[in-house]
Amino acid sequence: MLTCLALIALLAPDTDWAQWRGPNRDGLSPDTGLLKQWPAGGPALAWKATGLGESFSSVSIAGSRLFTLGDVGGSSSLIALNAADGKQLWTLKFGESGGKRNPGTRSTPSTDGTLVFAIGQGGELVCAEAETGKLRWQKSLEKDFGGQRPTWWWSESTLLDGDPVVCTPGGSKGTVLVIREAVKAGG
C-alpha cells in the first residue's frame, strides 16, 4: 500500500517532483507555506493506493500524475496514478521481477511531463508516454551497453538534465550513458 503518495501530493501542490529526490535531486522542496509542525494525529489521509506490487521505489510527480515502479504479476512495471484520487491510470510491464533476495523494483521513474523514463531491477531502460503508458523505446543495460548486473540488481534512477537522459550501465560499451534527443530520436 502506498499511502505516502497522498502525503506527497498534499505537500507539494505547486511544484513537480519529477525525479528521484525532487526538482534539484537534493531532497529539498522549493515549496513555501508548508506545515512547520504536524497536527495532532497527523494530516488527514487523502487517499490510498493498492495493487502496486513489491517495491523499494519512490514516486515522481508531474502535473496531475504520479509515477512509480513495482513488481506486479511477475514483471517489473511502470505505474501511473492520478494525483487527485490515487486511481491507477495505466501500468506498463517491461522487465523481469526482482532478485532472489529482497524482491521488488529499486529505482524511481523520471519524467518531463510528456515522457517517463525508468530502469527496472534487471537493467531494462524504458521510455513511455506519460499520458498513455505507451512504450516509446526500450534498451537493456546488459545486452546493449555491456553493463554488469550488480549484486543488488539495478537500483539507480535516470537523471533528466534538459533533453538528455543519463544513467550508468557501467559496462564495456559505456560506463555512463547519455541519450540525447531521446524524444526525437526514439531512443
Image: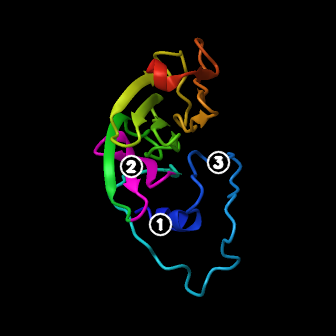
Res 48 seen here: yes
What's the amino acid at mark 2?
Ala
Tell me which residue sits at (70%, 58%) in the image: 30
Tell me which amino acid carries mark 3. Answer: Pro
Q: Give the alpha-carbon distance from disc 3 to disc 1, as whole Å.
A: 19 Å
Q: Are marks 3 and 2 in contact (CB under 8 Å)?
A: no
Query: Which residue is painted at 59% across and 29% down in the image?
Result: 163
Labels 3, 1: front one? 3
Q: Looking at the picture, which amino acid does disc 1 mark?
A: Ala
Q: Residue at x 44, y 38 (%)?
A: 99
Circle number at residue 118? none
Residue furthest to the bottom in view is: 40
Q: Secondary structure at mark 2?
A: strand
Q: In the visual, does 52 lie left or right of 73?
A: right
Provide the residue designation for mark 2.
Answer: 80
Q: Which residues are magenta?
A: 62-84
Q: Secondary structure at mark 3?
A: loop
Q: Position of residue 77 (x, y in %)?
A: 37, 42
Q: Earlier in the sequence, mark 2 or mark 1?
A: 1
Residue under label 1: 6
> To which quarter of the image does residue 152 belong?
top right
Residue 38: x %, y % from top left: 63, 80
